[in-house]
Image (cartoon, helix red, strand yellow):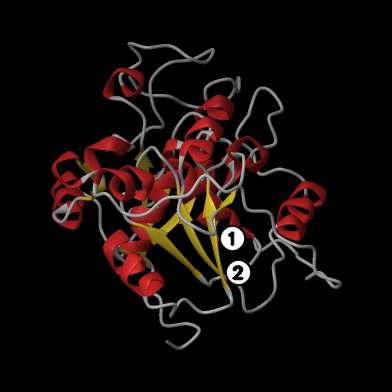
Amino acid sequence: MEQNALPLLLDPNDLNAIMATDALPENVCIVDLSNEDNYLAGHIPGAIYLPYQILVAARPPAQGMLPPLEQLEKIFEYLNLTPNTHFIVCDDEGGGWAGRFIWTLDMIGHAQYSYLDGGMIAWKNEGLPTTTEVVKREKLSTTTEISLNEAPRASLTDILTKLNQETFQVWDARSPQEFRGERLVAAKGGHIPGAINCEWTSLMDRERNLRIREDAASQLLQLGFSQTKDIVTHCQTHHRSGFTYLVGKILGFNIRAYDGSWSEWGNHPDTPVEI
């Protein structure tokens, strides 16, 4: 198999077949962002555990902001990032943290990755092989320097300047109760004016172990999204919208993510809201 032959959306059975024939390229790094107890109870052979908490800055009020460059450098030094590394990413919840990690890869300009469709839910439910052996990367003698690529990210100011533009859309991945302001988790309830609500788990197929729904594209188009428009997705802390960002990428949408999300927008004194 060629180094870059792995698809963006990788089915667990296809990965298992590749691994069964020892055909997985040496440049592949499998990253598991599951709950730690779930990882320890059984994971894909060779997968490295990465605690999802380190993917966020965790500074109030906008807890989900991208962490500082120094923190990102530690993450990717631990993962032995090289220009040729191909990440296969999974979690145990259907894709939120996996998508957040893939967005983080986009933020450092590293475009070689695959999402394991359905993640560890599909892998375990379908009886694919697991191990309890904890994997750690042996540190390389040299590390790859990283820098930020701002293209995948939208800021509060970006959104404010584009709110009334016909070519701009906001994808709110939160629950309908949060969207309508019935559940308050910030100083203000409601949603960004004009936003379209598509709750993240509605795009997961429960009959296929949380794989992305085969009709996801038509579902989004029916809601009013367009592949020709500039779409920004968010939730409360850019965790749930990690998945919707990923789905948008897989479907070919022109999508960015707002990592400030509602924890910033809903706590800012000057942001407009609709209910």
Task: Name the quarter where the N terminus is drawn.
Answer: bottom left
Could one spot residue 167 in this view of the protein? no
Residue 138 sits above or below residue 100 on the image: below
The local crowd at label 2, few if under 14, some if 14 to 19, many if 20 or more residues have their Cα within 10 Å, is many
Q: Foreground residue, 38 or 261?
A: 38
Q: Are marks 1 and 2 in contact (CB under 8 Å)?
A: yes
Find residue 144 and report its image quarter: bottom right
**Which of the labelled discs sits on residue 105, or is there none?**
1
Q: Position of residue 231 (x, y in %)?
A: 39, 53
**149 horizontally vs 271: left or right:** right
Q: Secondary structure at mark 1?
A: helix
Q: Amino acid at mark 2?
A: His
Residue 96 location in percent, x, y?
A: 43, 41
Seen as rendered, the residue at the extreme right is 141
The label number, if any, that marks residue 18 in the structure image = none
Provide residue 127's location: percent of width, then percent of height.
27, 49
Task: Report if residue 165 is visible in the image.
Answer: yes
Amino acid identity at mark 1: Leu
Tell me which corner region of the image, top left, top right, bottom left or bottom right, holds residue 15.
bottom left
- Position of residue 189 measured from the top left corner of the image (x, y, whole percent): 43, 16
Q: Nearer the viewer, residue 227 or 125?
A: 125
**Which residue is label 2 attached to?**
110
